[in-house]
Amino acid sequence: MISLNLQQKFTKMYRSHTNGELRIAHKGQEVVLSGWVQKIRNKGFMIWIDLRDRYGITQIIIDEDRCDKAIIDQAKDLGREFVIQVTGEVIERVAKNNKIPTGDIEILPSKITVLNASVTPPFTIEDKTDGGEDIRMKYRYLDIRRNPVKNNLIFRHKVAMEVRKYLSDQEFIEIETPYLIKSTPEGARDFVVPSRMNQGQFYALPQSPQTFKQLLMIGGMDKYFQIVKCFRDEDLRADRQPEFTQIDCEMAFVDQDDILNVFEGMTRHLLKTLKNVDVAEFPRMTYADAMKKYGNDKPDIRFGMEFAEINDIAQGKDFGVFDSQEMVIGIAVPGCSEYSRKQTDKLIKWVKRPQVGASGLIFAKYLADGTFKSSVDKFFNQDDLQKWADATGAKPGDLILVMCGDTDKVRSQMSALRMEMAETLGLRNPKEFAPLWVVDFPLLEWDEDSKRYHAMHHPFTSPKPEDMHLLDTDPGKVRANAYDLVLNGNEIGGGSIRIFDKDTQALMFDHLGFTPEDAQEQFGFLMNAFTYGAPPHGGLAFGLDRLVAILGGQETIRDFIAFPKNNSGRDVMIDAPSAIAGDQLDELALKLNLKTT
Amino acid sequence: MISLNLQQKFTKMYRSHTNGELRIAHKGQEVVLSGWVQKIRNKGFMIWIDLRDRYGITQIIIDEDRCDKAIIDQAKDLGREFVIQVTGEVIERVAKNNKIPTGDIEILPSKITVLNASVTPPFTIEDKTDGGEDIRMKYRYLDIRRNPVKNNLIFRHKVAMEVRKYLSDQEFIEIETPYLIKSTPEGARDFVVPSRMNQGQFYALPQSPQTFKQLLMIGGMDKYFQIVKCFRDEDLRADRQPEFTQIDCEMAFVDQDDILNVFEGMTRHLLKTLKNVDVAEFPRMTYADAMKKYGNDKPDIRFGMEFAEINDIAQGKDFGVFDSQEMVIGIAVPGCSEYSRKQTDKLIKWVKRPQVGASGLIFAKYLADGTFKSSVDKFFNQDDLQKWADATGAKPGDLILVMCGDTDKVRSQMSALRMEMAETLGLRNPKEFAPLWVVDFPLLEWDEDSKRYHAMHHPFTSPKPEDMHLLDTDPGKVRANAYDLVLNGNEIGGGSIRIFDKDTQALMFDHLGFTPEDAQEQFGFLMNAFTYGAPPHGGLAFGLDRLVAILGGQETIRDFIAFPKNNSGRDVMIDAPSAIAGDQLDELALKLNLKTT
């Protein structure tokens, strides 16, 4: 006996249940399902259809004995990705499938309706598809049907919701700041928007809501956040997007530690809620220490191989390569003392690649029996190499790798090698999460191209008061109240305590090469606002795309964006950007000025 | 004895509590507060400071007997909007203030630190300010400190959070769609963004994520929502913004009733959670009925005064004014039978204003004694007027107002008069909420300027199957599966069931005057997507700015936007839009083409 238990809310009854919902408890019920034909197996006397929607897969069984011939004929005409509606009875499967939640049941249909046909898709809608990146981007709407992409988008939604709930519970207010703002030359290149009503003038799309969130603090909003699109017209490196999403935050009446504590709490909440990972404590490390220990301001601390600066034990031993260089750095690679000649040669070749650019690599194998075998045995005896081991923390069985050169260069090269070894050894476990605060960033960095200092974070970052006296004499040494949150070797957030008085802000613009007039024209509204009772304030911004990717155990942000652009900034699905009509240009008082080649 | 109970988390201790937090239970504690000087009262021997932050106001008391002279002198130098930090003891007030939650206590300071001074603000930071609209917009960051603006922004946040929680609980996924998309000539004018990497080509900013959300349905995401900025480059009418926020939603495998039910649930949830208002049922009314009963597709049903079409009883009585017209409409205005000649003259003058454009107004007073007194007693006797009363539902004491003319015009005029009378009589109670679904909108509307039909909703809206046969013969009569949610006489949301097959979509573009080539070039990606198994789908979008304003009991959306633009599309605070540098134009391959006047 079939019980009729259709939910009232589905008036036309496209479905009474989703395809992930039915269990053995529904046995005997008449149900209506809708979805896509994932797969058809036709044995002649029996046909199985896997019916798919966002929620799962339900098996439809059609057999000669129990179904009308009309339904059998109809089923034979179905193709992959057809959209169908099935009315039928929930029955118990003879052969249960414990790999899917609906695997105990199947549907014996009394009616099948084709809601829409489908031509053959250009790639298979499977977890592992036969479609390449380009074709999947062009047909992104089909790519999204695949579990990996679908699940990434759902995961992204969950992350954003948890962020909002957490911050909202902490009395943060989400406030929308404008998208049509003012172009400023500081920082990256703006996307601009011509104004029709104010001809010859342009809005800019925000690179971040930075000045607005500061104005909100001056406006007394106290705790602000916003999950917001930002825009940068940069030449796109791999895995950069012209539009990206930030979790943008600002707080008033706070010091650096207050901010670090709040967002450590938020990150801990995300890790616990979404990944069921407990992280007791977020270590804090200065920028200087990060560079010294890892050659990198966003070190991956899921694994060791910390740098040892071994000038004192490596130099003065007549080994000219070391003696002539500013810095000698060693690391202990765990468990690689038995590397073959072929393997060490490969490493040497790897560090000499132009992307790394090292001139060479010295190694010392700390063998299991406690002896050393190195590529520089002529210059260093067992006692010398023991000192290397002590300095790098190498244990028997480890491989000590040493490079030398100018400090900045060799740090960067050794950082690359450290990451390469971690990758090779499988130490970058995507299920492990090791957050780290890097603090005390330099305020300014020298730019060779423009021959001037640029703000390392942005011009609104406050210098450390105790370093202010160096601004004129040694600007590169001035530290800022600036901090990054690093997760598994990726910068996922960064921020600073801001300048909140007009004089310091003017001084900063002066050091960045602004004339007082330029500073006033571009940022006068902010400096003016500082004179009306600006509270001390600071904040930070997370890159949501990156955060979601890393929490998802992946590194490609494109996989977590519904409709990403390619490396030329194009949306290949809708074919944008594109030419616009001449009268649109006229209305905007613009003419094309294309370079002829 | 003062107990030291500073919260550990405030390392530099800008504050241990907010200014809205302290109660009599905190008596005796030493606390640190920070905030703005709202008010200083100086009686010489005693000074009171109202210290303000987002959370409230706490009184600081400084007196000769209990405070150091240094603190007294310091307090005398403070001005309005100075940012200060106060350390002191919580004491019980002698004269309690039951108007504020902190009114039982005050702070006796041991230390005051000026964190930032303030010049005199250009207007008072009070609930009722002396600042006009222009000056408040220029100094919006000061305006935001005022409770009415601050509370509006906090309320907006709460509405958005409740929307997100509700939809998320209903398995909707918030998915970000791109901002840099493709310009299409259908609909309003796009804002465009020149592409530097694809010279001569432009992105457009989305007027809505319409096509993307449809692609997400084709992509199997099933239930989508997004709170998202949209953009329209329109000449700005009062209270329109070039950038505005939508709650954008779409569902697959649904019929109109499914959508109405879900979003009725959401709106009911908002009314209950945010306003503690229960609305049992959302009436549903066809567009045709709304026009007939209210002369308006977004009727305010908080009050009656429904239209009665009284041709049959008003015509044929030798009153030429009525006899010559297509339509005669009457309404019964409650309780206004005693209107004086002056009052009725004023009404007649009001309907003759160009904004309304009526040629005249007939009235009949249904007096308390049951007799009638009309402006047309020469033509209509008491029996005739009783019929008017029966038709309009007038009761003794009411005033019957009658206008006539072409159907469309007189409906619109009577609608304006009805709203005016409601306003006059105080029937538009902002604390009452009367939602209404208006359904069965026309598919197309004739546009006199372009001499062609335009989509009333948008080109993706599906016609009612039973009206399809009229598409060629009487296109204006074809009804769409389109609906609006109306709240208190404002359209707060609207949507439709979409076309989901290529042929119908092509037919629609044909009827909208697209050549097949144009349709393919602009919307080929969508029509193509329909061929890969598009499910039936539909959705709607709420205007968040308007929704928040109406829930907040107000009608000006600008008051609920942190940084609104003025009627010329300018942000007067940051002074945008503005000129950009010549090399920015060069990089974009553009030249200005200003008209000389």
Image (cartoon, coloured by chain):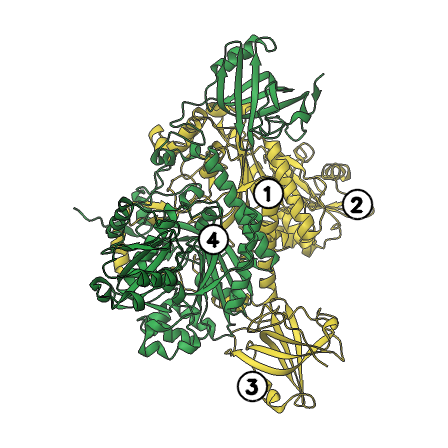
Chain colours: A green, B yellow
Which residue type does callout 3 highlight?
A: Asp
Amino acid type, residue under disc 1 in the picture: Leu
Same subunit under labels 1 and 2?
yes
Nearest to viewer (mark 3 / mark 2): 3
Chain letter of the residue carrying label 3: B
Left or right of residue A555: residue A169: right
Q: Tell me whether circle 1 and circle 4 mark residues in contact (CB < 8 Å).
A: no
Upstream in sequence: badge 1 or badge 3: 3
Q: Secondary structure at mark 2?
A: loop
Disc number placed over residue B391 in the picture, else none: none
C-alpha gap between disc 1 and disc 3: 53 Å
Measured from the top left, where is residue B107 in percent x and y? 67, 79
Residue A503, quarter of picture: bottom left
* Inter-mark Cα distance, 1 to 4: 19 Å
Are tags 3 and 2 found on a single chain?
A: yes
| Quadrant of the image containing the N terminus of chain B | bottom right
- Of B278 and A491, the residue lying toward us: A491
Identify which amino acid the numbered label 4 is placed on. Val
- Does dot 3 land on a helix, a strand or a loop? loop
What mark, if any, has residue B167 been given in the picture?
Answer: 1
Are the numbered discs 3 and 4 placed on the same chain, yes or no? no
Residue indicated by mark 2: B396
* Quarter occupied by residue B309: top right
Q: Is residue A457 left or right of residue B259?
A: left
Q: Which residue matches tag 4?
A: A228
Q: Position of residue A92 (x, y in %)?
A: 64, 20
As drawn, the label of residue B77 is 3
Confirm whether residue B580 shows in the render.
no
